[in-house]
Amino acid sequence: MIISVASGKGGTGKTTVATNLALSLESGVQLLDCDVEEPNCHLFLNPVIEETETVFTPVPEIDADKCTFCRKCVDICRFKVIAILGETILTFPELCHSCGGCMAICPEDAITETGRQLGVVEKGRLNNIDFVHGRLRVGEAMSPPLIKKVRSFARSDKINIIDAPPGTSCPVIAAMKDTDFVLMVTEPTPFGLHDLRLAVEAVRILGIPHGLVINRSDIGDSRVQAYAGRENLPILMEIPFDRRIAEAYSKGRSIVEEMPEWKEKFLKLYSQVEKLVE
Amino acid sequence: MKIAVTSKGTDLDSQVDPRFGRAAYILIVDTPSLEVEVLDNSENVNAFKGAGIQAAAMVSDKGAEVLLTGFCGPNAFKTLAATGVKVAMDAGGTVSDAVKAFNEGKMPFADGANIEGQT
């Protein structure tokens, strides 16, 4: 089972839902923080990190002695990684998306593979909860390959919870694609609703079963609920705007640690997801 | 000497386009004759990525020695530097204003990019 926790708008409570769900399930569960640009699940889970792996993406290196300046590599590259100016070869490896086209098309075998560091993947655990997250290298623009690397640790014999990045762009798709269920966390505000609609559209294109968690459910207005009704989106959980939750959050503590009665609600959330996946 | 100027139009009276990679046109102005060759930059305007690199390659292919523009990013600057094209930035007014200002020594050459890379 792979559950991704996503939202359109940022700051709606994805990490809160992902970490509390993992803590409530207690064992047989893995938390994969795929928000690699700003991972924060570890702040609430406090796992012990046991392994760190540096992740690279292949980029071209050109042997100037073999190059005949035919420009086939320049023409095939959509990202202008290679510039040939007369007999000067320039490469901009930070723009490369690692398609391998330049290496495949070069008639002189002048292009070989070297690596650009994307970031690191860190693996650890808290009690019986396995934890993996990615940290994108500062300055790196391309996060999907690192997200996929984090996801490669998903195990079929466990419940895998993925904390996705916000938005609806490539990193989010990389985090949600081919998961069994998407928990969409939103808030009942105009911004929350606006971005939720976009996220729902994306999830529908991917054809993944999904349901809503409404966070800070007693603020704002009722338009998110009305939208959910119209679109037949099941509302699986509502988390009220509670000062105790905010205070716990500000100290890096989870809801279930602070208010153990919530554990049952998160377990119920999981069993509803389980039913919807079947 | 050939001077490349980023332009919103196709003649010397057009306004300078402050963007380099995604300028509407790049005019190659030959001095002192002021003969103009118009390069349509529409392909780069819509380029997915690397518009600056591509525009820089085009300018150098045309044999320009100098580029006058508003802003130039790091990848474009690196490409221009590799081919020996000198860059003067913060150009404004019309293309002929910019060429005149350059000829009068009012536009110094830059030694680096004046904006961050564009994503």
Image (cartoon, coloured by chain):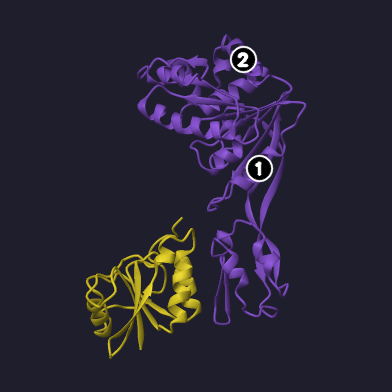
Chain colours: A purple, B yellow
Give the quarter of the image for residue A96.
bottom right
Q: Nearer the viewer, residue A147 or A207?
A: A207
Q: What percent of the width, then of the height, locates residue A119?
A: 62, 49
Q: Nearer the viewer, residue B57 or A227?
A: A227
- Apparent side of residue A174 relative to residue B111 in the rendered image (left or right): right
- Apparent side of residue A121 relative to residue B78 in the rendered image (left or right): right
Q: Secondary structure at mark 1?
A: helix
Q: What percent of the width, then of the height, locates residue A124?
A: 70, 34
Question: Residue drawn 60% across and 34% down?
Answer: A176
Q: What percent of the width, then of the height, locates residue A252?
A: 53, 26
Give the quarter of the image for residue A116.
bottom right
Residue extending farthest to the right is A157
Counting every numbered tag in the picture gives 2
Tell me: residue B7, above or below residue A123. Answer: below
Question: Residue drawn 57% across and 34% down?
Answer: A164
Q: In this rendering, does residue A154 appear at all?
A: yes
**Mark 2 highlights which residue?**
A272
